[in-house]
Image: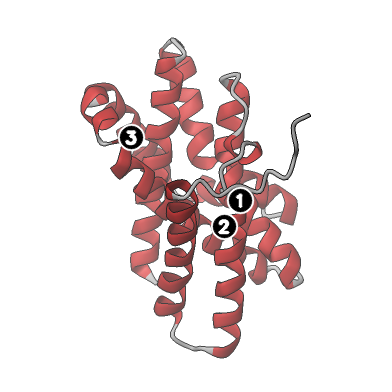
Amino acid sequence: MDWIYFVDLFGTGIFTISGVLTAMQKKFDLVGTLIIGFVTALGGGTIRDLFIGRFPVGWLNDRNYLFVILIGCLVAYIFKDKIIKLKKSMFLFDTIGIGLFTILGIETALEFGLNVEYCLILGVISACFGGITRDVLTNEIPLIFRKEIYATACFSGGVVYVLLKKYSTLVDLNILISILIVILIRYFSIRNEWTLNFSTED
């Protein structure tokens, strides 16, 4: 699963860029922008590791994550205008990222012998809580709490992964199918304006 490691680093870079762009739009200074990029990229995995008692948390054992975050910050600053024009592409990369981080979160939790239902929850936390932290720190309503189907897509992909893992030994294919489920649910929910908002207006 070496390719998963590199895709994980790529997703970390994408989340960094997302955080940095949000901070720049909010007129944060350089230090504040770097902090937002950092917590967006690593917040979810850090919270997951703290929950399961994994010390030190995963990224502290690997310098590559720090390098990727620094590169992501530079890319966001240098190519800000071009990246904003590629909004649809960023949506795709972000969706691939949350799909992958969901699976990685589930796998990490399974290694600690947790029940499957808790592993699914921790997978969603891995995927979503970096974005939640970013939004809270930049005074935005977190995407997970808005009408868009976000965490539900991660959870659905996670369920598919757990089922495939139980009945199939094709590890890479299981991961690809599960990520694809997340992408398709996110794509069609945005395209067709699907929501889980059941509130009614008077």
Q: In the rendering, at what x and y percent does residue 117 appear?
A: 74, 67
Q: Which residue is mark 1?
A: 151
What colour scheme was applied to this rendering of the protein? secondary structure
Tell me the SS state at disc 2.
Answer: helix
Give neighbour class at mark 3: few <14, some 14-19, many 20+ (Cα, 10 Å).
many
Q: Residue at image x 66%, y 45%?
A: 47
Q: How many marks?
A: 3
Q: Position of residue 15 (x, y in %)?
A: 43, 40
Query: Residue 55, image x and y in percent?
Result: 66, 51
Q: Quadrant of residue 25?
A: top left
State how far apart marks 2 and 3 are (Cα). Answer: 24 Å
Q: On the image, numbered disc 2 is attached to which residue? A: 154
Q: CA distance from mark 1 to mark 2?
A: 5 Å
> Mark 3 sits on what residue?
72
Quadrant position of the N terminus in the picture? bottom left
Numbered disc in front, either 3 or 1: 1
Q: Amino acid at mark 1?
A: Ala
Of 194 and 122, the residue lying toward us? 194
In the image, residue 56 above or below residue 103: above
Looking at the picture, tell me which residue is in the foreground, 11 or 150.
150
User: Residues at badges 1 and 2 in contact (C-beta under 8 Å)?
Assistant: yes
Mark 3 and mark 1: span between their CA atoms? 24 Å
Q: Is residue 68 above or below residue 179?
A: above
Left or right of 196 on screen, residue 98: left
- Answer with the quarter of the image where residue 116 lies: bottom right
Q: Is residue 64 visible?
A: no
How far from the left and from the top, in percent, is residue 126? 59, 51
Q: Is residue 59 above or below residue 102?
A: above
Viewer-proximal residue among 84 and 50 = 84
Tag 3 secondary structure: helix
